Image: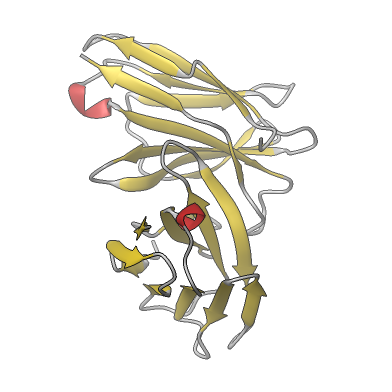
Amino acid sequence: GQQVMQIPQYQHVQEGEDFTTYCNSSTTLSNIQWYKQRPGGHPVFLIQLVKSGEVKKQKRLTFQFGEAKKNSSLHITATQTTDVGTYFCAIAGGSYIPTFGRGTSLIVHP
Amino acid sequence: DSGVTQTPKHLITATGQRVTLRCSPRSGDLSVYWYQQSLDQGLQFLIQYYNGEERAKGNILERFSAQQFPDLHSELNLSSLELGDSALYFCASSVVGTEPDTQYFGPGTRLTVL
């Protein structure tokens, strides 16, 4: 099945710094989803990207889908302690079996 | 609150035992997914049901089985438990399940096998 590599695995930032996590696939993706899981919580859907080169924003979060639809990124501007958690990308292949990246754990130091 | 409920919240059992995890999807959702989350393996897709029928199967062990009932709730049965089965088990639901639509996750069941 399709696989997706997510980097970095961990990211420590000072509050106010920016943060970016990346997802890369060796094959063209039909779509990509992003989820956030707070410590001790469950994954929560953030957004879905479908179009080549698509950019979507949610307040301080910016999501991008690569032109070749093989990679995606999530960028957080001016992190806050409420941004702490693990961010996952997820893909669904032709058979719609969902595959999640290993996630990037964001640690924000006040 | 996602609207997906899972019981029990915690489960502690011994090796060799069998347990059943229960999931109730959001009202109106026809599709249910089961995932296993462990520290070293991340979030692993196990199986998906849509309107009572199995739709997709992931890395689910033969010792594990699942079903979705007419009222759309689902159960995941884990048997001959091993220490390595200790993990968080999430259920998620979606409206259709035939395209990559949004999945709503339940709070999870933490299984500890001693």
Q: Is residue B66 left or right of residue B71?
A: left
Please tell me in which quadrant of the rendered image residue A27 appears.
bottom left
Q: Let me know if residue A97 appears in the view.
A: no
Q: Where, by quadrant of the figure, is residue B88 drawn?
A: top left
Identify the residue at the far front of this view.
A110
In the rendered image, the vertical position of residue A70 relative to residue B19, given as above or below: below
Horizontal placement of A47 versus A89: left or right?
A: right
Q: Is residue A30 above or below residue B7?
A: below
Q: Is residue A26 left or right of residue B81?
A: right
Q: Residue B17 location in percent, x, y?
A: 29, 8
Identify the residue at image location x=62%, y=64%: A47
Of B103 and B1, which appears nearest the observer?
A: B1
B19 in relation to B92, above or below: above
Rendered residue at 38%/14% (across/down): B11
The one of B101 and B2 positioned closer to us in this rendering:
B2
Q: How far across and how far down the image is residue B45, in percent?
A: 43, 45
Q: Is residue B82 above or below residue A32?
A: above
